[in-house]
Image (cartoon, rainbow, N blue to C red):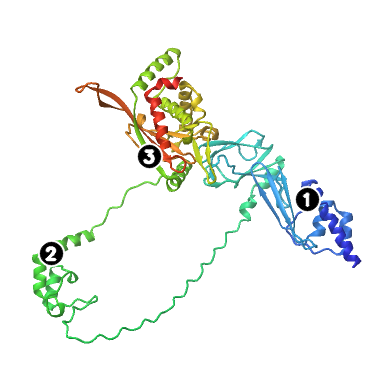
Amino acid sequence: MAYASRILLNHSKKLKDVSTLLRREQAASIRYFSSTKRASLSREDASSARLGFSPVERITRCSTDIVPVSISFATTRTTLSSTVGRPRLGQEFSCSMQSVRGFSSGSDLPPHQEIGMPSLSPTMTEGNIAKWLKKEGDKVAPGEVLCEVETDKATVEMECMEEGFLAKIVKAEGSKEIQVGEVIAITVEDEEDIGKFKDYTPSSTADATPPKEELAPPPPKEEKVEQASPPPEPKTSKPSPPPSGDRVFASPLARKLAEDNNVPLSSIKGTGPEGRIVKADIEDYLASGGKEATAKQSKVTHSKVPALDYVDIPRSQIRKVTASRLAFSKQTIPHYYLTVDACVDKLMGLRSQLNSFQEASGGKRISVNDLVVKAAALALRKVPQCNSSWTDDYIRQFKNVNINVAVQTENGLYVPVVKDADKKGLSTIGEEVRLLAQKAKENSLKPEDYEGGTFTVSNLGGPFGIKQFCAVVNPPQAAILAVGSAEKRVVPGNGPDEFNFASYMPVTLSCDHRVVDGAIGAEWLKAFKGYIENPESMLL
């Protein structure tokens, strides 16, 4: 009894000091952890363990039978979590350690760091290695670019976080669909350790075991239900029906005539006894044009359809993400559409005046799209309900007015953002839109160039001459404006026989009905139309 009390007292003291001991040097504890089985310690072994080992080692040796260890590596830090097996007191005990260094899980490898695929945008789940700017054996320093990663929206440079040497490139240049967190490279501290990773395989992929296929439950046994046999029908004298089944009854002369003229007997209704086909039936069929129809059908049946000529185009990362997000938008967002025609005669006149000032001062010309972006931003400030986003718990209304502008490129559709567009002048908006469009075409947009938008403008009128269209809401936003091309129309004048010409531009607002009610969307379009038809008010 006294011996059990001493053992209980010793373990109680050790468990009491766990929080202090775990803050000790991490490397000593990491190197000691093992996945091998250890026999339980006797009283003498426990005493020698107290005298011959460090406090952290005493905890692990004296309190565990099995010490499974799992090491997981991230891009910017390394996390080691070990669940110590079963203590002698019958309770579960666990510890979690974090380190910026990576340590090998094998005794034959030196300390190293596994660099994983980073998450470079909120919607990124996988990426592609576009280009490696460092090669194996190169020295790397914090801030230096390791590689270029193609994300779901752009190609982004990935920088190194620590100093060392690039020992192994796990994912070669051009690798596609690499999941976030998957190891792409190995770095070491000492240059002489590079050669030890020539045939290295990351633990995350080496130890991975394919998931066991779940056995499909056996199909339920069909219960056989004996159906009661119907009562026998009374025999009455009825004309015998025509024979059923695959067999067709016909006279020998009718069969010979049908074979000579390539006539299928199954398509002829017999008029003979008991539905038998006779010679007269075949002659009537041929007289009604059946022979020509049968011949044509035979020719069509034996003709070969020519094979289609096609080419398979690989899907880019931006194309896959665009397809996924737009499908999600149409399936989950209740769209509705509002369309108005805005007279742009005054707008075009103001644009001509402003461009004359711009040319005189050496500035860039202002486009109609720049004026549309400015008018949309001011309308959002006047009707902030449209500058909102839907969540499961609340509707978030933004105070910043950030306008995404749709840009079509060879790689796909990009939507760079003009931030605080309601506070910027027309020349500033125009310069930013041109710069962002150029970066989108060069596939060099950074996350800050397309994240944080609250409203989107898509213009297919000016560049393509599209009269009117309905755009798909860009989640998590609540609305998107589709701009068509301006056209001249005949409008009534002041007098009964007078008429004038005016240019009108149709615009369609697509709204998320969960956030923007119909009246709110109409109020926003009214404000937008007011700025377009009276553009001087945008300068106030």
> Between marks 3 and 2, how big is the CA–CA gap?
57 Å
Q: Position of residue 435 (x, y in %)?
A: 48, 26
> Around disc 2, counting alpha carbons within 10 Å, would you say few (fewer than 14), some (14 to 19), or many (20 or more)?
some
Q: Going from the N terminus, do you reach mark 1 or mark 3 first? A: 1
Foreground: 510 or 118? 510
Q: Give SS at disc 2.
A: helix
Considering every residue shown, the one lying at the far top of the view is: 360
**Residue type of the residue flagged with mark 3:** Tyr
Q: Earlier in the sequence, mark 3 or mark 2?
A: 2
Q: In the depicted view, which residue is nearer to us: 180 or 348? A: 348
Q: Amino acid at mark 2?
A: Lys
Dividing the picture into quarters, in which one does residue 485 lie?
top left
Name the residue that disc number 2 marks. 291
Name the residue at 43% across, 25% down.
370
Spatial distance from mark 1 to mark 3, Cα to Cα? 63 Å
Answer with left or right where residue 72 lies relative to residue 345.
Answer: right
Up-down: is 40 above or below 31? below
Q: Which residue is mark 1?
A: 29
Farthest-out residue, right: 2
Q: Which residue is mark 3?
A: 337
Is residue 57 visible in this depiction of the protein? yes
Residue 76, given in percent of the width and then of the height, sits at 66, 41
The location of residue 66, given as percent across then percent down, is 75, 61
The mark that comes first in sequence, 2 or 1, is 1
Q: Secondary structure at mark 1?
A: helix
